[in-house]
Every structure is written in C-alpha cells, then in structure tokens.
Image (cartoon, rainbow, N blue to C red):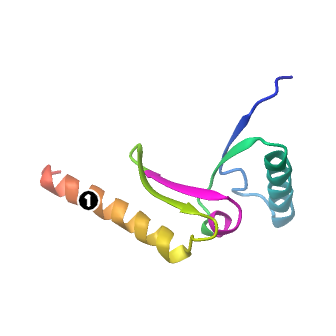
Amino acid sequence: MTNPRVLLMDDPTRGIDVASKYDVYTICKKLAEKGMGILFVSSEMQEMLSIPDRILVLSQGRLKGEFLHEEVTEEKLVAVSAITIASKKDLEEQDGK
C-alpha cells in the first residue's frame, strides 16, 4: 500500500445514512490530524459549514471565493455562488447564447 499525502473525496456522504456520515467525518478528522491533506467536495451546505478548515468555491475552473472555517457563513457561500451563476448568465447573454 502507498502512503498518500492527499485524499480527494467527491461527495462521499451523498445518499448514506447519518451514522455512516459521522463515520466518514471521523475518518477524515483522524487522517487530517496525521497530516494528510483532504480535498472534500460536497454539495451539502451543512457539511461545508462544519467540516473543513478552509473552503474554496470553484466555478468553470476558476477560484470564485475562499473562506476560513472561522469566517464562513451560509450567506457568504450563497453570495459567492450567486455571483458565479449571475456572471455565467451575463457572459452567455453577451455571447448571444
């Protein structure tokens, strides 16, 4: 077995029960405490507000926002997401799509 330094998890808790979600969170926390970097992709707002040390909001391959755990709020995440969606719509309208 290899010793990875980074673990990418893409919506690992989607469709699983609450107890299993807790297990995933516990494993992630233990791995992070051992120094592993974890990229945790999630479509669940509550996970984004409670789990990560840092949140990056990406859209169309570009960084749209970055927040530390201490400073992030649901309102800030929604605002960055809304700007991203509005910007894409504006670009499409300018291109005549």
Q: Position of residue 11 (x, y in %)?
A: 65, 51
Residue in front for this viewpoint, 58 or 66: 66
Q: Furthest-top residue in view?
A: 1
Residue in the picture at 21% in, 53% down: 92
Which percent across, then down, holds residue 74? 54, 74
Q: Is residue 6 magenta?
A: no
Q: Which residue is mark 1?
A: 89
In the displayed structure image, the side of residue 2 where residue 52 appears, left or right: left
Which amino acid, by three-letter code, is at mark 1?
Lys
Q: Where does the image place residue 41, in percent across and percent down from the top left?
A: 61, 51
Please tell me which residue is depicted at 74% across the width and 33% down the height of the picture: 5
Which segment did they paint magenta?
A: 46-58
- Give the structural element (helix, strand or loop) at label 1: helix
Which residue does the image show at 79% across and 42% down from the upper left? Answer: 35
Looking at the image, residue 76 lies above or below residue 37: below
The residue at 63%/63% (across/down) is 48
Whether residue 21 sits left or right of residue 89 in the image: it is: right
